[in-house]
Amino acid sequence: MSKETPIRMVRPEFLDFVNYNICKAYSELYGKEAAEEFFRRVGEIGFRELRRRIDFPSREPYDILKRVGEFLEEMGYMAKIQLTKVSEDEVVIEMFGVSVIESSIRLVEEGASPSHIMTNLMFAALKELCGLRADIEDLTLEQPSKETGYAKERWILRTL
């Protein structure tokens, strides 16, 4: 490769493209429930790898969720993530410019399972570091769209 050959960064649209293909194929081969279980496991393995890359000095659930979100933002998975601590067991998460929003919407419409990599990384982090799980309520007034790439959720944290 010559010095004149530019190196291109992976664009978010490509992540969306790959996300759709992987999720759709797994859902078709093994079914939606098996795909959901598979992607939960992907999150667990991903969190184990994430702990090798970044520190989690706090064991407070809000701090842990925030650190995972910061990592995903830094990596370009989404343009911005905003977490609001409502109480000790409730966090509101707003996501802007999610790179896999189009594929996720399409997968849900088709009855397949999206990867939900952010959610599954955060689930694994809460489980491993806090012994907690989360129940999620969608707070987005309009369905997320590829134009906005926006989603808002309320996470209620509960003991495993």
Image: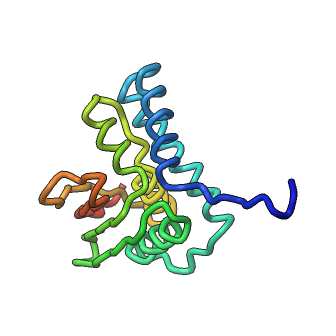
Figure check: 16 above or below 31: below
Question: Quadrant of residue 20 in the image?
Answer: top left
Picture residue at 30% right of the left edge, 63% below the top: 157
Question: Quadrant of residue 97 in the image?
Answer: bottom left
Picture residue at 68% right of the left edge, 64% below the top: 52
In the image, is 14 to the left or to the right of 89? right
The percent position of residue 57, horizontal first and vertical second, equals: 56, 80
The percent position of residue 145, horizontal first and vertical second, equals: 25, 52
| Count of all numbered marks drawn on residues in the image | 0
Figure check: 68 above or below 107: below
In the image, is 132 to the left or to the right of 52? left
The percent position of residue 121, horizontal first and vertical second, equals: 48, 56
Name the colouring of the figure. Answer: rainbow
Picture residue at 45% right of the left edge, 69% below the top: 69
The percent position of residue 104, horizontal first and vertical second, equals: 35, 44
Give the position of the C terminus as an image quadrant: bottom left
Figure check: 88 above or below 76: below
Figure check: 93 above or below 127: below
Of 109 and 63, which appears nearest the observer? 109
Quick one: which residue is furthest to the right in this view?
Answer: 2
Quick one: which residue is furthest to the left in this view?
Answer: 141
Quick one: which residue is furthest to the top in this view?
Answer: 29
Quick one: which residue is furthest to the front in this view?
Answer: 4
Picture residue at 36% right of the left edge, 29% below the top: 33
